[in-house]
Image: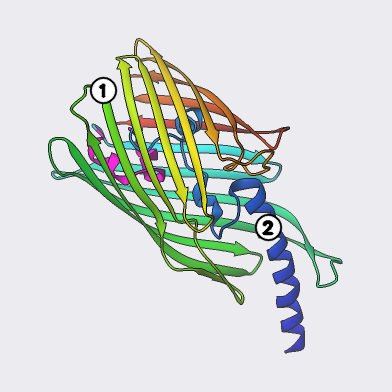
Amino acid sequence: MRGDKMKGGNLFISGFLLLSLNSAVLAGGATASFLKIGSGARSFGLGGALASVADDINTLSYNPAGLASLKKSEIGFTRAELMEDISYNFLGYSRNLTVGAIGVGVDYLSQSSIEGRGVNREVTNKFGASDIAINLAYGQRLTAMSDIGINFKYINSRIADESANGWALDAGWRYKMPVKGLNIGFAVQNLGPKMKFIDERSSLPLSVRFGAGYKIVDNILLAFDVNRRINEKKTVFCFGSEYSVFNSFFIRAGYINSGVSGAISLADYSGFKAGFGIKLRNLNLDYAITPFSGIRKAQILSLGVGF
């Protein structure tokens, strides 16, 4: 019994250090912080300002109401290299129905070869860690001008042989304004109970997001989001722009202002983002690069196929 407790204690110390590292580097102070990363290279290039303008399967990460406006069924994949031995992947599928559309997606964050630490901070065996979220969403046109959507998530976080399970809900709304080219969006994300890891319970990264997107002309888009992180008591401002050439080549630039100077967190780091996209018939290829913590850079690649 004592050996089991000691093992659990060692794992808790190692897990606590790991969660602290992931929270600091990836998304900042909350359980299942990987949920704040978001999928899609386009979203990174737009600085995360997607509440009102997401138009592909990656709308699951920002506003499930966007599913209602998808014109085709789609398969999408995102790969992000965040740090050494840390990667993020997303695979999603959407399908139009007679009424509305459904979307399913899997977010997966993995880290390997982590050095364990005991209660006295001595080096123990290496272990791995991972986080996964399985999404099931539905979006529907409410009126000629507005859409609604909901997304249910099953969440699992694992460190070595220990794991924590939880669930969360997202709900969203989008509205096409009377002004041509202007849309607004609103979403509540990660509403759910605390997750328990060993003997500790922590809150999910609950947030409320509002955004507006405006197409000045057919090939220039401006977007703006305000994201209030409830449990962290923090407000993040996101700005994005997109310029398209013949609706085939896209250049993007964005900026995130978290109010935190010199943050080492990917989600909290205030700074510029950039990316580009290529569209060939039913194929979309997007790339983005986003610096954080001064010297680190995350590279994101997305591929989408419509049918």
Q: Is residue 51 left or right of residue 198?
A: left
The residue pinned by badge 1 equals: 181
Residue 61 lies in magenta, yes or no?
A: yes
Q: Is residue 51 left or right of residue 199?
A: left
Instruction: Estimate the x, y position of residue 188 in percent, counting from the top left.
Output: 36, 52
Residue 174 lies in magenta, yes or no?
A: no
Instruction: Estimate the x, y position of residue 253 in percent, counting from the top left.
Output: 50, 22
Instruction: Estimate the x, y position of residue 43 in percent, counting from the top left.
Output: 45, 33
Please, is residue 191 above or below residue 70 in the view? below
Instruction: Estimate the x, y position of residue 222 in percent, counting from the top left.
Output: 39, 23
Could you tell me which residue is drawn at 19 percent across and 39 percent down?
146
Q: Residue 270's image quarter?
A: top right
Q: Is residue 190 left or right of residue 271?
A: left
Q: Looking at the picture, tell me which residue is in the foreground, 259 or 293.
A: 259
SS category of the residue bearing label 1: loop
Please state the extent of the stretch shown in magenta in the rendering: 55-70
Task: Name the mark on residue 24.
Answer: none
Could you tell me which residue is drawn at 70 percent across and 71 percent down?
12
For marks 2 and 1 on the same chain, the one whose residue lies earlier in the sequence:
2
Q: Residue furthest top?
A: 246
Task: Name the mark on residue 20.
Answer: 2
Q: What is the chief secondary structure element of the magenta stretch?
A: helix
